[in-house]
Image (tube, helix red, strand yellow):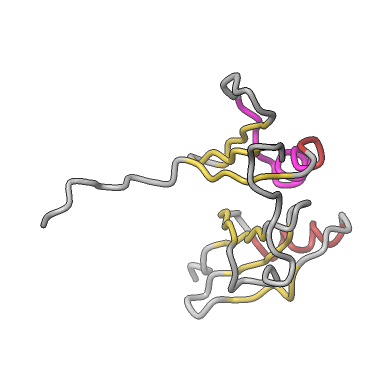
Amino acid sequence: MATTIRVQQIDHVTLVVEDLSRSRAFYVDLLGMTEVARPAFSFPGAWFQAGSTLVHLIEAHEGSGRPGVDPDRAHGSRCHHLAFSVEDAAAAAEHLQECGIPIIGDVRRRPDGAVQVFLPDPDGHIVELCSEPDQD
């Protein structure tokens, strides 16, 4: 059977967080996303623009899932994570360290040459910042 569905791109990702203002500081102040208008849902949250993708945060409440991830399973690149393109992941890692933000492991180069750095958000969601391989 031929498919009639053609996914175009990721529209948004949704994360449940414990403290909306703490997460806003992480995604806006640290990672440089822009907060955008959010519909008047009956539960607290915030939306951020990351390139063409939206990041939807939902503050934990009675009807939501639990915030964060299982800390026993969230330890690096081989677990659930979000990846964002940045111009220079190695420079981003230096900035994170200067800001006292912990990174997970070392800055690493994938087999294709792309550079990756991983860090936890305030609720333990793993965020990858990656940059393209050098074009030399």
- Please identify the quarter of the rendering in which residue 50 is found: top right
Residue sitting at 50 percent across and 41 percent down?
12
Q: Is residue 91 magenta?
A: no
**Residue 78, picture quadrant:** bottom right
Q: Quadrant of the N terminus?
A: bottom left
Q: Is residue 75 left or right of residue 80?
A: right
Question: Percent from the top left, x then y, of residue 37?
Answer: 60, 22
- Left or right placement of residue 118 versus residue 5 in this view: right
* Image coordinates for residue 136, horizontal then vertical, percent: 49, 71
Nearest to the observer: residue 88 or residue 4: 4
Residue 33 lies in the magenta stretch: yes
Residue at 38% of width from left, 46% of height from top? 9
In the rendered image, residue 7, in percent from the top left (x then y), is placed at 31, 47
Compared to residue 27, the image places residue 126 above or below, namely below
At x 68%, y 68%, the residue is 74
Q: Residue furthest top?
A: 40
Q: Which span is picked out in magenta?
A: 23-36
